[in-house]
Image (cartoon, rainbow, N blue to C red):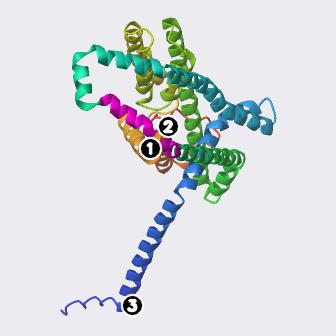
C-alpha cells in the first residue's frame, strides 16, 4: 500500500498576500485609533449630545401629547438652559458677598494675628529669630509686580469660559438635531437587516432610551430630595446662605458613590463658622442618617425600574468614566453600563427565543434586570 501523498506546500504568493493583509489591517486599526484620538473632543460632544437627547425624549414625548412637537422641544430646552442660570444666580451672589466681606475684614485679621504673636512668648521668639513679619512685608511689596501674572490668569479663565460656552451651545444644537432626527436614522439602519433582527434592534433602542430617561429622572428626584432636606435642616440650624448650600448638595448628589459625601463635607466645613460645635455635630448626625436612608430606601425605590446594575460594575464604570471624562464621565457611567447590560441580555434573548415569540418594538420594555425568557425546548 503506497504512502499518502504529502500536502502541497503553500506558494510564496499566498504567504505574501496573507502577510500583506495582516499589515494593512494593523495599519488601518492604528490609523483609526489615531483619528479617534485626534477627534476625541467632537466625539465626546456627540456622545454627550446623544445622552441629552435620549434623556429629554421622555419630557418631549409627554408634552407632545398636549402641544405641537416643536413647541414641546423648545419648552424642554428652555428649561434645560434656565436651570444652570438659576443655579448660578443662587451661588454667585453669596460668593461675591463673602469675598467682599473677607477683603474688608483682612486688616482686622492681620491686626488680630499681630496681637496674638505679641502676646505669645514662643511666637515672639520665632518672630525675632526668623523675621516672619519682615518676610510677609517683603512678599506684600512684590504683589504689584505680580499683577501682570494675575491678569494672565484671568485672561486664561476668560478664554476657558468662552470655550465652555461654545462647547455647550454646540452640544445643545447637536442634541436638538438628534432628538428630531436620530430615531429615523436608527430605524433606517435597522430596516437594512432581516425583519427579525430589525425588530430586535428597534426593541433595543426602546429599552436603552427608557433606561436612560428613567435613570436621569430618578437621579434628579433623588438629588432634589437631598437638596430640599438639606435646605430645611440648614434653615433650622440658622446657617447663613442655606439655599446656595442646598444647591451644592443637590448638584453633588447627582455624582454617583461619592457626591453625597462630598456635599455633606463641604456644608460641614461651612457650619464650622456658624455655631461651632453645635451646628457641626447636628449636621454630621443628619448627614450620616440621611445617607443611610438614601442608600437603603430612597435610591433603591427610585432606581428600581431604571437600572439594575451590579454594584461592582457600578464602581468600575464610575472609576473608568471619571478617569476618561472627569465628573461628566462619572455621571454618564451608570447609564452606559446599563445600556451595555441591556444589549447583552437582549442579544441573548434574540439568540435563544424564536422570532415569533419576540415582543414587537414599541411594546413597553420590561423591567431592567429581569432574566431573559428561557430558550425554547
Viewer-nearest of discs 1 and 3: 1
Above or below for 148 versus 66? below
- Residue receiving disc 3: 13
**Quarter occupied by residue 217:** top right
The image's mark for residue 321 is: 1
Measured Cα–Cα span from mark 3 to mark 2: 53 Å
Disc 3 crowd, CA 10 A, few/some/many (<14, 14-19, 20+) = few
Q: Nearer the viewer, residue 305 or 334?
A: 334
52 with respect to 150 (left or right): right
Q: Nearer the viewer, residue 157 or 138?
A: 138
The image's mark for residue 331 is: 2
Label 1: element kind: helix
> Mark 2–mark 1 contact, CB under 8 Å?
yes
Label 2: element kind: helix
Above or below for 250 versus 320? above
The image's mark for residue 299 is: none
User: Magenta span covers which residues?
Assistant: 132-150
The first of marks 1 and 3 along the sequence is 3
Q: What main secondary structure does the magenta stretch of the protein show? A: helix
Amino acid at each position: 500500500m503506497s504512502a499518502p501523498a504529502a500536502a502541497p506546500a503553500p506558494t510564496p504568493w499566498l504567504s505574501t498576500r496573507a502577510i500583506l493583509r495582516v499589515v494593512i489591517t494593523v495599519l488601518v486599526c492604528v490609523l483609526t485609533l489615531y483619528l479617534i484620538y485626534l477627534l476625541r473632543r467632537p466625539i465626546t460632544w456627540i456622545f454627550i449630545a446623544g445622552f441629552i437627547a435620549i434623556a429629554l425624549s421622555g419630557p418631549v414625548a409627554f408634552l407632545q401629547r398636549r402641544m405641537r412637537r416643536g413647541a414641546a422641544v423648545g419648552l424642554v430646552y428652555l428649561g434645560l438652559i434656565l436651570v444652570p442660570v438659576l443655579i448660578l444666580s443662587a451661588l454667585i451672589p453669596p460668593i461675591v458677598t463673602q469675598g467682599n466681606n473677607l477683603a474688608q475684614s483682612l486688616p482686622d485679621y492681620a491686626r488680630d494675628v499681630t496681637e496674638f504673636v505679641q502676646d505669645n512668648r514662643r511666637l515672639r521668639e520665632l518672630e525675632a529669630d526668623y523675621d516672619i513679619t519682615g518676610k510677609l512685608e517683603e512678599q506684600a511689596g512684590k504683589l504689584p509686580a505680580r499683577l501682570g501674572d494675575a491678569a494672565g490668569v484671568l485672561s486664561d479663565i476668560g478664554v476657558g469660559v468662552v470655550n465652555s460656552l461654545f462647547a455647550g451651545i454646540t452640544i445643545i444644537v447637536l442634541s436638538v438635531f438628534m432628538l428630531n432626527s436620530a430615531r429615523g436614522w436608527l430605524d433606517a439602519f435597522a430596516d437594512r437587516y432581516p425583519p427579525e433582527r430589525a425588530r430586535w434592534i428597534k426593541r433595543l433602542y426602546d429599552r436603552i432610551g427608557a433606561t436612560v430617561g428613567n435613570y436621569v429622572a430618578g437621579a434628579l428626584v433623588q438629588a432634589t430630595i437631598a437638596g430640599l432636606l438639606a435646605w430645611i435642616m440648614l434653615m433650622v440650624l440658622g446657617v447663613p446662605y442655606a439655599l446656595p448650600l442646598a444647591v451644592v448638595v443637590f448638584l453633588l448628589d447627582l455624582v454617583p458613590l461619592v457626591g453625597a459625601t462630598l456635599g455633606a463635607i463641604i456644608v460641614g466645613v461651612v457650619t464650622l463658622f456658624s455655631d461651632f460645635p453645635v451646628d457641626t455635630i447636628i449636621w454630621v448626625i443628619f448627614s450620616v442618617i440621611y445617607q443611610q436612608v438614601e442608600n437603603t430606601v430612597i435610591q433603591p425605590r427610585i432606581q428600581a425600574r431604571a437600572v439594575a446594575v451590579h454594584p461592582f460594575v457600578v464602581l468600575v464604570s464610575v472609576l473608568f468614566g471619571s478617569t476618561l471624562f472627569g465628573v461628566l464621565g462619572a455621571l454618564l457611567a451608570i447609564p452606559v453600563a446599563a445600556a451595555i447590560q441591556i444589549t447583552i441580555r437582549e442579544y441573548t434573548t434574540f439568540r435563544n427565543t424564536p422570532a415569533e415569540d419576540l415582543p414587537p418594538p414599541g411594546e413597553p420594555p420590561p423591567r431592567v434586570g429581569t432574566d431573559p425568557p428561557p430558550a425554547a425546548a
